Image (cartoon, coloured by chain):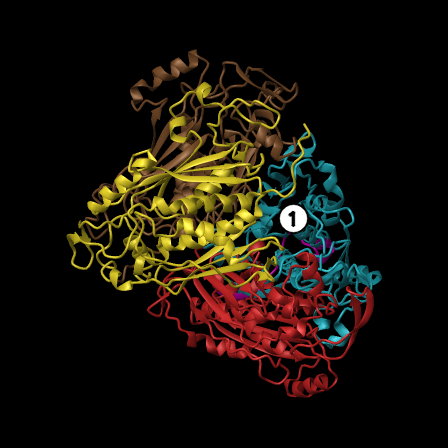
Chain colours: A yellow, B brown, C red, D cyan
């Protein structure tokens, strides 16, 4: 089901080469000023154009078609639509039979009995993240202004030095290949006590939404996988003041599934774009033989470059869903 | 909210030192034979007793109090209860004020205004995973018998050699410390096409439930974080036959959020138990000073040792929720 | 929250005088042939134009903007939009302060702090039922072809004789008044055993959706309120064959919340349109005084006349949500 | 699915002749004082014993097994259990084959393939309403103390005169028959603006839960079905002051699905108990013939007498789910 959230709820639709991508947001309080300009900053971070991104150019203008009156939210569902403008479906003629490796072509065909829209990945396309990013913009408006997001691609192709990323992208371009990367997100200013025990822990909800972003294959909070190599005395975060601040932050700002008043910190592994220029030997369901496949279409050399804005939007959406209206008084 | 699942739904309750842990399962088809004996194998894998596990001993007998008639499920909700028998609440007298580092003591108090049950972590305790494990037993009964689970602790304290785990646990014991670990789970025999695009991808639902397990701080599928270091040509899985089998499995059995007919593979990072025997310097909310804290109570030296059964249960629960009753015919 | 349904899920948006009304449907199987023409029959039943209906004329063309490929559903969410074309917002200038009696003007302003869209009732308008009606068209396609709907206005202004309805409407028109009515719906061909015990009984889900239709103030199944005046021996439905058919149908086709194989029968009370031409004395929040209010705008004399198609759509939607894919074998 | 509610959520289990009836409540704020004594008043109103009620005697002691610590709610799920003590299953030996007319015996068998628990109606039994009633007690504690419930059986066997009810019950008893009735509920003190537009209107959520109560076959708000016989000028409620009070209350306290600050008023039609002492001619699935059936077991002569407490609980539960924490400021 294409819905997410409890108090701030998303319902999404659209295909890569259909007329539009759309999303409806429910649970937005009335009276919040909102205009199309508010979306530009985050949408431009996700938009293609920079080195290593696809040649497909979309203007990504958010059409706000409901839930607004005189420039303010009304409390009714807010629907947004993004027209698909730069579509070249002829590039995808072959994908229905000769499925692209590590893409959803085959699984979508199995899941939907061959009736799925194969053009550009259809409903499985990363194109839908334009709507997620826009939802993140609205979500941020629901959060206290103390909350600040810091998101960056901190690793590409195994390299942690951003000064060398350009060089690696050039190399991948030359070799008709693609690169994976890691996105690091830190969110400061979240009050302590957000989240729910067990099933609706901050980690649970956030990973749920992060893994909905195409190409995400790993999520870790705080020390994450490296924390599993440590001892308790090395990995514990001693509390140092009455606000619950800790001297270290190996927990990534979450204890027992609840925010602890320190920065929320997590990392996201983004796989290399599966669409690569060099030919691949893979099974052709039409001929029944393994044959070389050359992928046409316009693709990102490193999808992690554009996914940062989406990852940050996911964090904002989950925090908006978990936000608590009334400060809790601690009466021990 | 303490509920999970769409078609196979869990609702959980209980506290570490309350009278019982319970869970009610909804969406179980009628007519499935089930008895208390069916739970023993998986519950014993989670139970304490082995080296490195807590001294608390619970018999973990599942009382099936509804939804069964003459030994078969009726289609009505199936409720199960586990009595808490070996409780020593006096050990937790101090935790309300002098919060244990990297535990939920402080965040729970903030979240619930100081009214949370602090004994043994209350509702935040890993004791609740006994109910998750039992739910996994039922979930497995809803799956086709072709599906096989293989779960193991593959790394402890940074070491990948199971023959050396004992030695590391001894060392941690001597030093009053604890160890983290990594659990690897592989599930074979899942038909292709299970899962939903985007929000209800297999990765989304599975990570949602995995991060609900206390101490889990990282989840990766297939090549995961190491895949982010690879190129597309290195990380892609070429399809080799009409069933969609691939020559490699860097995708961990999932493309576009849907199972692809290969083994589902994922890894879970479990942090070292935050309760350690050696004193820790941490803030005392009662005195307003940083003071040494010595944690009493009985705790696991390496909670990953017992979490494998829970991780496997989580996989079974998500698969039971996503299972598709009718094989899809591929009509391209 | 503007969502309904479990397996067949609706998410709706739009305002009476905004740019569009929209709905996204989730859970539609792939491969169902669907075109805009399929919607005309039911939408025309709801459309204004006949005696007693509003002068507002909308063409109600369903724009299917996602979830379709080559004329068939893809299994992805199906979004539909209806452009609002015949809008005269100037008629609603006064409603924000001088609230129309028995309308949502005042409650909406309280609920949304005065930020609601007041034009034509905004999000509370019966205009949104165009999307519900369209959802009903899709829902019917998911049901077995044996299922047949029979819906009619059986009572207007206290009169059960359809031949006299015209006369009553003329009188109400002359008097600047409006009329209420009762809609009767009978659905034949539903297999026995659809529905869930307790919270998701057929009556529960159906009434939930029926009461979401503006102006609906009563729902009864089978003998309903008159059945409460009967004795058990008068109201019981004896079973007469192995298919579970009954000699009477006082249960309205539902026992224990589940369909029993007989016709589903229910009645819906629709209040008279609160917008009437004659002046009404009511409080003006602007002046702080009770003052005569003359309502402008174009309104239905008897909204029940157009609500039949919506009531039937609600029944189809709930049945589509509850439909069971595999016939149950009775193995007593 | 046996769950209800969004912010205040119920999950129920149990069978008439199983070991217990249970319910878990989620979304309860921490810090509310609660003891088993608090439940006695409402549970006793539902309990049998009075004239016209079943001879089955249950003490209905609520065992609060989680979510409480030192007499106050902790914010964790609150589970309650009621032991079934006075069970006589031998009375139901025949019902599996010779289904009782207008009971769930046949539909349950179809729905669950014959694996349902037939003893006393199993999971379909009105016995489960003990848990609903208890949930209502908790729900009332979440509401502002201004809210007052007034619930009464206002009609039995077609008679509106409570002084004659006894006489009618005697007659039904003598004739081996049962009686239906109507319950009227009025709730005063609800702030204006509770509820949601469309799908989660107060009427939608309340009818959803009311129709989950066994034997309820009709629900109407305010003037309801009689309002459908009126004109707009007769049925409209003029507003008379700045608080939104109206001179009449034909709307039953709800406009546009939201509370309007006047009393919430609704009526519930309860069918006559289908279990009657006199023999009934009905199909025997075992013999394949229509045969006389004599129903054993202990039953209510008029289930409406005990359903009032359940109806009131349903209202409290829905209001607790819809309650709004912060008073809305109206800034027109």
Q: What residue sits 59% from the left and 57% below the top?
A: A73
Residue B299 in view in this figure: yes
Rendered location of residue D277, percent (x, y): 67, 59
Task: Please tell me how many numbered marks the rendered image carries.
Answer: 1
**Left or right side of B320 for D275:** right
Is B146 on the left-hand or right-hand side of C62?
left
| Image spot of residue A88 (x, y percent) | 29, 63
Instruction: Give the residue at x 19% y 45%.
Output: A175
Quadrant of the image containing the C terminus of chain A: top right
The quarter holding residue A210 reads top left
Q: Nearer the viewer, residue B176 or C203?
A: B176
Q: Secondary structure at mark 1?
A: helix
Q: Which residues are magenta?
A: D286-308
The relative height of residue A232 versus residue C35 in the rendered view (above or below) is: above
Residue D20 percent across, percent down from the top left: 60, 41
Q: Quick one: which residue is furthest to the top in this view?
A: B174
Note whether residue D230 is visible: no
Place residue C146 in its image quadrant.
bottom left
> Is B315 included in the stretch rendered in magenta?
no
Q: Nearer the viewer, residue A207 or C90?
A: C90
In the rendered image, the vertical position of residue A251 relative to residue A293, given as above or below: above
- What residue did someone put label 1 on? D132
Q: Is residue D289 magenta?
A: yes
Residue B331 occupies quadrant: bottom left
Q: Residue B83: horizontal and vertical position, in percent?
A: 55, 30
Quadrant containing the N terminus of chain A is: bottom left
Specify whether A304 is left or right of A67.
left
Q: Chain of mark 1?
A: D
Q: Please tell me whether residue B58 is drawn above or below residue C330 in the rendered image.
A: above
The residue carrying pointer 1 sits among few (fewer than 14), some (14 to 19) or many (20 or more) residues within 10 Å by Cα, namely: many
Residue B156 versus residue A32: which sits nearer the camera?
Answer: A32
């Amino acid at each position: 089901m294409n819905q997410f959230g409890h108090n701030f709820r998303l319902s999404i639709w659209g295909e890569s080469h259909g007329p539009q991508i759309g999303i409806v947001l429910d649970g937005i309080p009335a009276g919040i000023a909102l205009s199309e300009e508010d979306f530009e900053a985050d949408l431009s971070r996700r938009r293609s154009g920079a080195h290593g991104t696809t040649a497909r150019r979309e203007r990504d203008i958010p059409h706000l078609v409901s839930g607004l009156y005189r420039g303010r939210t009304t409390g009714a569902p807010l629907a947004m639509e993004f027209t698909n403008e730069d579509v070249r479906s002829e590039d995808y003629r072959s994908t229905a039979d000769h499925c692209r490796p590590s893409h959803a072509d085959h699984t979508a065909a199995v899941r939907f009995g061959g009736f799925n829209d194969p053009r550009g990945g259809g409903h499985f396309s990363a194109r839908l993240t334009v709507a997620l990013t826009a939802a993140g913009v609205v979500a941020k408006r629901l959060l206290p202004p103390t909350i600040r997001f810091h998101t960056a691609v901190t690793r590409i192709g195994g390299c942690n030095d951003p000064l060398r990323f350009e060089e690696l992208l050039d190399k991948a371009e030359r070799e008709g290949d693609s690169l994976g990367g890691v996105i690091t997100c830190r969110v400061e200013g979240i009050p302590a006590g957000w989240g729910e025990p067990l099933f609706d822990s901050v980690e649970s909800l956030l990973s749920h939404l992060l893994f909905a972003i195409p190409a995400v294959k790993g999520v870790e909070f705080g020390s994450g996988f490296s924390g599993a190599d440590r001892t308790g005395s090395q990995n514990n975060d001693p509390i140092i003041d009455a606000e619950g601040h800790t001297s270290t932050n190996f927990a990534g700002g979450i204890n027992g599934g609840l925010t602890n008043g320190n920065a929320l910190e997590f990392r996201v592994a983004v796989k290399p774009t599966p669409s690569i220029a060099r030919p691949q030997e893979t099974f052709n369901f039409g001929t029944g033989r393994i044959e070389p496949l050359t992928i046409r279409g316009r693709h990102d050399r490193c999808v992690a470059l554009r996914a940062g804005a989406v990852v940050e939007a996911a964090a904002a959406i989950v925090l908006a869903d978990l936000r608590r209206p009334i400060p809790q008084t601690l009466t021990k």
